Amino acid sequence: MNDGKSDSLTASDLLTPRDNLPWRKEEQALTRWVRPFIIDNAVTRTHCTSVLTQERRERTLLRDSVEGELARLSSVKQRFWIAEYRFLEKLLLFRQLVTYAPSFLNLSHIMPKKLIYCRRMVVRSYLEQSSLPNTPFVEKLCRQFVRSCVFFYPAEKLIEASDKFICLAGKSADQSRAANRQRIAMELRALQLMSDREICDQFRCEDAYLNELALLTKLARNYRLGVDDIFRITADEISNFWNFQG
């Protein structure tokens, strides 16, 4: 006999975090470029604002510390690196910022501005040769990637990272409701099928994992996804969906 409970289940009910996952002790900073897709809508923007608000005190303390270290540079260099840090901190969760900040400070002492501009020019030219759609959304993503990639990736990995970004931007270009709804269903199903180790390898730290689940929960509710939308997705579809991250 059907008690009616299954009829009331929604996809968001499937997003309970797993307990006791085997997270590595050494966390690796992730950016918005290491993910299956990007959704740019009111739900995502509100969620990001909420995270920034919750982390405001910790972020302010870390920023003060970073800018205190940057104050040792000449005034021209100091202004440049402070502007770059304030841009990059929008792409990282606080826990990731803490991991990344020492590397950023090291770069501020050893990486000339001319080298940064040259590498950005190479990446920009490379992206222009791709077949990415020429839309305002994709152009915005490209500007953000070009500016940030030189700080996140060493020179020998810039082209490899650019190839992955091109795939990400291409898969995210269609921001229609139908396309976003399908993307959310695909990631939700993928997370269900992943082993504990695969989840840890994908997100690298618990904060990133929990943040993703919180955002997916809001998106699943917004797009009114039901359990049937999730369970009809096949393993082959999941494989094709996740495989581009390599």
Image: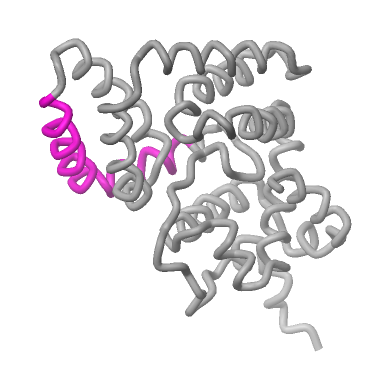
In the image, residue 66 lies in the stretch drawn in magenta: yes
149 sits left or right of 64 in the view: right
Residue at the image position 85 percent from the left and 53 percent from the top: 237
Q: Judge whether residue 175 can be spotted in this image.
A: no
> Which residue does the image show at 19% across and 36% down from the upper left?
66
**Residue 127 placement (x, y as % from top left):** 66, 17
Does residue 57 show up magenta in the picture? yes
| Above/below status of 186 relative to 42 | below
Q: Where, by quadrant of the figure, is residue 46 drawn?
A: top left
Seen at 59% across and 46% down, the residue is: 222
* Color style of the picture: one colour
Give whichever of 131, 81 is nearer the camera: 81
Viewer-nearest residue: 223 or 144 = 144
Image quadrant occupied by the N terminus: bottom right
Horizontally, residue 15 falls left or right of residue 53, namely right
Residue, x 67% and y 72% (percent of image)?
195
Residue 25: quarter of image: bottom left
Q: Position of residue 205 (x, y in %)?
A: 45, 60
**Above or below, comparing residue 23 to residue 147 in the picture:** below
State whether the magenta stretch is mostly helix, strand or loop.
helix
Whether residue 97 is visible, yes or no, is yes
* Residue 175, horizontal then vertical, whole percent: 68, 29
Query: Is 220 placed above or below 13 here?
Result: above
Q: Tag count in the figure?
A: 0
State whether residue 145 is above or below residue 194. Answer: above
- x, y percentage for residue 228? 80, 62
Magenta-highlighted residues: 45-72
Which residue is outermost to the bottom?
A: 1
